[in-house]
Amino acid sequence: MTSYAITPASEVTVPVVGSNTVFPVRRIYCVGRNYAEHAREMGADPNREPPFFFSKPRDAIVAGGGAIPFPPATTNLQHEVELVVAIGKGGLDIPESSALAHVYGYATGIDFTRRDLQILAREKQHPWELGKGMDNGAPVSPIIPVSISMPTDSALIWLKVNGETRQSAHLDQMTWNVAEVISRLSHFFALAPGDLIFTGTPGGVSTVIRGDVITCGIDGLPELGVTLT
């Protein structure tokens, strides 16, 4: 019988819409600058360059949102609303033509970013970990299985801060669509059931502060709400 030297960490899960089951999270992958408008506001080339990826720790998930503590060591915390893809079938070098068959479901997520730390890391050619990998940095709504529903290409993706719209776009404005993202990502990593992919954010990211109430959603998916405390 295995004996642990310390108490193992709790499993990270996200509720599944329409059932009492939960989705166990294995890894979190994120796509950088996947909307042209956001690429422009970050000072990058908005043209269709190959997608690039980074990761967040899985315990950054805040399932269902709610009150979360304002992160330390930043004076420029920014929101990024994103379509989140939940992988139900793994694979390596997945063809684009069959990539959507690997999707279990979809959710709405926020990629919180300590922008000041990210920019400093970028200037020094350091990893983005301090800017992106913080505690509570990946709130996500319950997941809707594709067997129940899935967002259309024209679905609206939006985010409001204290009732004021900050981000608004449509999913077909993504530079690389979901099938392309899955195919490209699986060239570098063997995807597996339980992986979540944050697919990038549209333009309009802005700074938020302690006390702000953030709501966001994607047509056809559950909305997500977060309060910074």
Image: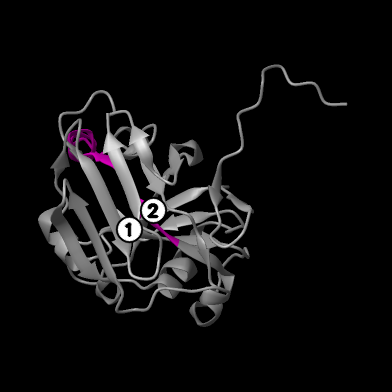
Say if residue 170 shows up in the picture.
Answer: yes
Q: Check residue 121 for magenta coloring.
A: yes
Residue 57 picture location, percent across and down: 46, 39
How far apart marks 1 and 2 lie (CA) works out to 10 Å
Furthest-top residue in this view: 5
Question: What is the secondary structure assignment of the residue under circle 1?
Answer: strand
- Does the segment drawn in magenta span residue 110? yes
Residue that numbered label 1 is attached to: 82
Three-letter amino acid code at disc 1? Glu
The residue carrying mark 2 is 30
User: Can residue 111 be seen in this snapshot?
Assistant: no
Mark 1 surroundings: few (<14), some (14-19) or many (≥20) residues within 10 A: many
- Mark 2: which amino acid? Cys
Q: Position of residue 7 (x, y in %)?
A: 67, 21
Q: Indicate whether 217 appears above or below 93.
A: above
Q: Residue furthest right?
A: 1
Residue at left offset 39%, top offset 53%? 30
The stretch of residues the image draws in magenta is 107-125
Label tally: 2
| In this picture, residue 124 sits left or right of residue 138 | left
At which x and y percent is residue 175?
28, 71
Q: Is residue 91 left or right of residue 121?
A: right
As helix, strand or loop, the secondary structure at mark 2 comes to strand
Does 77 sit above or below residue 223? Answer: above
Q: Residue at x 27, y 23 (%)?
A: 72
